[in-house]
Amino acid sequence: MLTLAGVPIGRPEDAPARLAAELASADVIAAEDTRRVRRLATALDVRLTARLVSYYDEVEARRAAELVDELRAGRNVLLVTDAGMPAISDPGYRLV
């Protein structure tokens, strides 16, 4: 399953509980900024067990194909972007 999520612009506690749950349960997390996702997970007291990969404009075309393979293999993929929503104002339209 593919889940799309945006990182809160403000404080980590502005993140919905669903985002914390998705961070904790994803098999693969594709993030516009992996450092920011790690900081968010720490602030939310979430232990990341997923494979964390970068997903930003310059690698989007190549990475989308890899993530589709992960989805076809039955893995849960979480696409997380900064201060916007995937496929709307941030990378993600190729994967979606």
Image (cartoon, grey):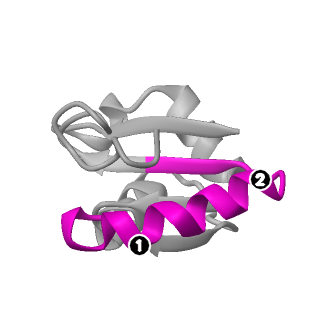
Picture coordinates of residue 94 (x, y %)? 38, 48
**The N terminus is located in which quarter?**
top right
Q: Is residue 40 magenta?
A: no
Q: Say which label, 2 or 1, has the lower sequence index.
A: 1
Q: Residues within 10 Å of mark 2 (few under 14, many from 20)?
A: few
Nearest the eye: 40 or 3: 3
Check disc 1 and report its element: helix, strand or loop: helix
At x 22% / y 40%, what residue is drawn?
Answer: 11
At x 30% / y 73%, what residue is drawn?
Answer: 59
At x 35% / y 46%, what residue is drawn?
Answer: 92
Nearest the eye: 13 or 59: 59
Which residue bears the numbered disc 2?
72
Answer whether residue 52 is visible to the viewer in this image: yes
Q: Which residues are magenta?
A: 55-79
Residue sitting at the far right: 74
Left-right relation of 71 to 61:
right
Which residue bears the numbered disc 1?
62
Query: Relative to 20, does residue 48 appear above or below in the rendering?
Result: below
Residue type of the residue flagged with mark 1: Arg
Answer whether residue 42 is visible to the viewer in this image: no
Q: Main secondary structure of the magenta part?
A: helix
Q: Is residue 78 magenta?
A: yes
Among the 4 quarters of the image, the one containing residue 17: top right
Check disc 2 and report its element: helix, strand or loop: helix
Picture coordinates of residue 24 (x, y %)? 66, 51
